[in-house]
Amino acid sequence: MVKRREMIGKIAATVAGILACRKLTGATEGSKMIVKPSPQQLSWQELEMGMFIHFGMNTFTDREWGDGTEDPRWFNPTEFDARQWISVAKEAGFGYVVLTAKHHDGFCLWQTRYTEHSVKNSPWRNGKGDVVKEVAKACEEIGVKFGFYLSPWDRHEKSYGTPDYDRYFKNQLTELLTEYGEVLEVWFDGAYGGPPGKEHKYDWLGYYEVIRKLQPNALIAICGPDIRWVGNEEGVAPETNWSVQEASHFHRILGITGKVWYPAECDVSIRPGWFWHAREDEKVKSVEHLLDIYFKSVGRNSVLLLNVPPNRKGLISDVDIQRLREWRKVLDRTFATNFALNKPATASSFRPDAKPSNAVDGRKETFWSPLSEKDEWLEIDLQRPTTFNVAMVQEHIAEGQRVERYRIEAWDGSDWKVIARGTTIGYKKLDRFNDVTATKVRLVIESALATPLIQAFGLYRMER
């Protein structure tokens, strides 16, 4: 892994061409163009969380970045169990996984035909093993979507830095896209190397063509047109987070200008490093830290990609599993009861087909929509004094992201008291605050780019 803030900027400056991203969707509303996600982007966002799986030669060398000189015989996860990995992912609530099929050292976790630097020359499974195959199969059987990380930078392959490398890389992409079932996400890191001034100029156009041809529904992340990097490796999205972005360098190369749908993914590791290291067993992030990450990623209109690295046995360590279970328990307990669900709802105004009760009916296909874009409110009658400290708001992003500014108020018996303020909402916005006891709550839309579509409003209580 690398601090991509610098690397992505450098790599973008060298790109000579890129395949057109999935056809942009949008609609006009009055004089305004509303940008919408593709069906694939929408389905991905609804998964909310994925599990990154960093596993490979670095697991056995105790490094983060290998240099490509590693001996394949060092790779030998004697108790390897892909089903354990994916069962852990499922239990923790991850809707997909992204496996490091090849990191910067060039060591391949599948039976590739294009290099000897792979599992086929390891003692594991007598050289017949295939990590990618077993993980993809476990995902299919257990019900978790599968994705892979393939490092464009390869420190082992001798053709790196020449046009032959692009053919090599596309051959590897082809293997991964045709032999392991449906792929949700292809993850391209921004790291690359070579002598100064002679870095490899990747054939992104060619890479994307391969993906779109072989897996047209796969999303291309980070160095790709479908999912953007949030900008840090802390798992934290900005408080104001638009999925609608100005066309990036990638889009402008294609002649696309204006606004595009380009949602953020927040990657972070449960440990200080991305690969497993025994010395970090005591440094697994606390439940409180993981909860903070959740609220600042999923709760800020992003998707969380949390790395959980297997150890040298080929198993996720007990300490990581226990921490995930503790984290999941708090989330499940917090969001088990929505105090606003099916409660009486009124509003300042509403369209006949988008009444106030739609925001609290628990259905994702319905929404409340007022008649204007400013100073509109939705009021929920909780019917009795209710104590809560978390509020959730969701927009109906199938029709775009619209809200610019909002506040949440609670009725204190004589007046409305502001308990939270925010800017963007998007797929999901979670606000935390001190315990509030109230009989009525209001969501006030202070301003929006177009008529708001509020899909859900919820109130919850997290025990502290």
Image (cartoon, rainbow, N blue to C red):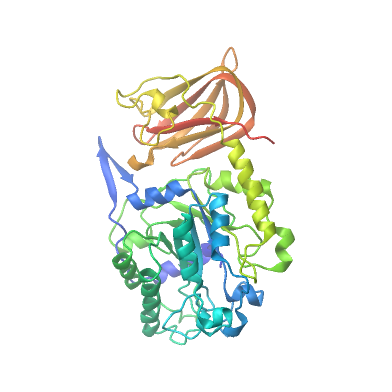
Task: Decide: is 152 above or below 115.
Answer: above
Residue at the image point whose x is 68% and y is 59% from the top: 318
Depicted 388 relative to depicted 87: above or below:
above
What residue is drawn where x is 27% and y is 55%?
23
Where residue 219 sits, quadrant-wise, is bottom left
Q: Nearer the viewer, residue 322 or 220?
A: 322
Image-quadrant location for residue 187: bottom left
Q: Position of residue 155 (x, y in %)?
A: 52, 81
- Quadrant of the image containing the C terminus: top right
Front in this rendered view, residue 39 or 109? 109
102 vs 412, left or right, is left
Residue 209 screen position, x and y as percent:
30, 69
Residue at image coords 28%, 49%: 25
Q: Quadrant where the N terminus lies?
A: bottom right
Q: Where does the image place residue 234, in percent across and percent down from the top left? A: 59, 55
Q: Position of residue 414 (x, y in %)?
A: 58, 12
Q: Is residue 281 visible?
A: yes
Query: Is residue 400 visible to us here?
Result: no
Q: Is residue 263 left or right of residue 156?
A: left
How many marks do you count on the picture?
Answer: 0
User: Which residue is rendered at x = 42% and y = 56% of the image?
Assistant: 227
Residue located farthest toward the top when viewing the structure as drawn: 414
Q: Quadrant of residue 255?
A: bottom left
